[in-house]
Image (spheres, rainbow, N blue to C red):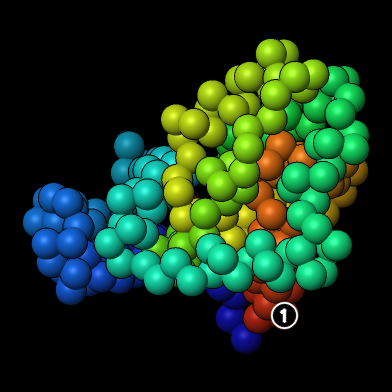
Amino acid sequence: MPPVDCARWTTRLTASYLAIVAGLIAILGNAVPGRIWLVAIHLTLSASLLILNRAKPSAGILPVIRDWHPLILFPLLYKEVEVLAPAIGNWRLTTAIPAWESALFAGQPSLYLSERLALVPLSEYLHFCYLSYVIVIPSVTAYWYVSGRRAAFGELLLMLSAVLLGSYLFFILLPVDSPYYLSPRLGPPLADHFFFDLAHQVSARGGARGGAFPSAHVSGAVVVSLVAWRHQPRLAYLLVPFTGSVMLATVYGRFHYALDALAGAALAIAVVVASTRRGRLSWTT
């Protein structure tokens, strides 16, 4: 079986996602604010990526755009969920997830963990880990890119694109509000400390209502750890504690339900296992 070209499949995934979302926006019509502009932007980006994919860029800025476009688009496409989910999605899971959570865990861990473990050092550490997500993944990606580990770089971008874009589409169609929006905000003694306040300020500005299940925070962290395990085990030893802490932090800080975190981890594991069973992965420069 020939190797999978990660660069080309990553670009195809992104272009396909943009085209699918453009179609959803067009179908919904006036329900989506600024629909004409949104459809035009999505289709233009999709077409541009497909053209770039066929052009085989070898020098200049074009290879950099082809290689790095997912990490540039991820935060924008995530934030877009907040606009599209209210117009497109069916919100029935917003009531189902908390009910399932209570039945499985004798209550909601997103509420009782921080109440039972109201320790400021633990809270600050977990909120630091929650924030570090936005630094660790780009840093690992950049490290592999500049150090010539292009196979690891390509596999990471492909796996991240699969889990994150798949999650974003799910958010749009079946959005779930997180406990961050539905539960009482945490107060003292955990509040009014540096990393706690910073994490909640970032979530207030960068979060997207409806984007709770599965947790993209967790799926991204698990993907980077699993890819590192395949390509650079020493780095993976450093990342695994980070991944476990991120999973706990999403629930402890009331950013996600425990089911969100478990679903995010399961999605990441399924995608990585499926990709490795498919065959060898390559990166075409």
Q: Residue at x 82, y 69 (%)?
A: 104
Q: Which residue matches tag 1? A: 277
Query: How many labels were placed on the picture?
Result: 1
Camera-side residue of 99 and 222: 99
Residue 34 seen from this side: yes
In this rendered view, identify the residue nearer to me: 180 or 19: 180
In-image side of 75 versus 262 (left or right): left
Identify whether 180 is placed above or below 13.
above
Where in the figure is residue 87, as x and y percent of width and height? 27, 62
- Label 1: element kind: helix
- Across and down, in percent, residue 52 comes to 28, 56
Residue extending furthest toward the bottom: 1
Q: 153 left or right of 103?
A: left
Query: Which residue does the image show at 69% across and 13% down from the upper left?
Result: 192
Q: Residue 194 is drawn in which quadrant?
A: top right
Q: Amino acid at mark 1?
A: Arg
Residue 223, given in percent of the width and then of the height, sits at 69, 56
